[in-house]
Amino acid sequence: MAQRISRIDITPLVGVALILVIVFMVTSPLIMAPINMKVDLPKARTIEVNSQENITISLSRDDQIALNEKQISQSELENELRMAVDQHPQHVVIIRADKYVEHEKVLHLLSIAKKVGAKQLALATLQRNREER
């Protein structure tokens, strides 16, 4: 007489489920790859901040950099910013970049600010007019 199966072995099912999860994790970034399309970003609603209480890094379209009102070279930025942050650690470091500057350059400025010890970071945007809301 044949024995009855008292329990179902789900080990193969768990193996297949884990393989499917791994496949989906690997393929999902490929599905979300950027598409060449025009994207109009909205203007930000911001709060005006007193500019005397900030440390401002400005980046122009032609890669000129200024720290507050002083134009400096890229090689001087880290040291100058470190001195400014050390003198005023509570101040917000604001990055003002031209809208045509590549995002990679803005991220580089953010990483430098974080590296020198800035605790509060912000990106400057145009403030929307009340009529545009």
Image (cartoon, rainbow, N blue to C red):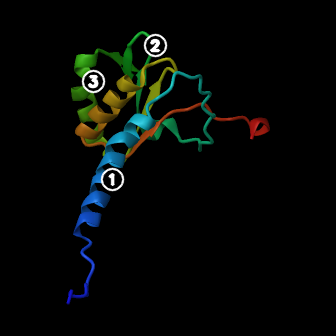
Residue 29, image x and y in percent?
38, 39
Kind of residue at disc 1: Leu
Direction right: furthest residue:
131
Kind of residue at disc 2: Arg
Residue found at x 29% / y 58%? 16
Q: Viewer-proximal residue, 40 or 118?
A: 40
- Compared to residue 121, the image places residue 108 above or below, namely above
> Residue 70's image quarter?
top left
Q: Secondary structure at mark 1?
A: helix
- Compared to residue 38, the image places residue 44 above or below, namely below
Residue 68 visible: no
Mark number for residue 123? none
Direction front: furthest residue:
1
Q: Which residue is mark 1?
A: 20
N-terminal-most mark, 1 or 3: 1
Q: Is residue 38 left or right of residue 91?
A: right
Q: Tell me the distance, in whole angstroms, between the alpha carbons under discs 1 and 2.
A: 46 Å
The nearer-to-camera label among 3 and 2 is: 2
Q: Which residue is mark 2?
A: 61
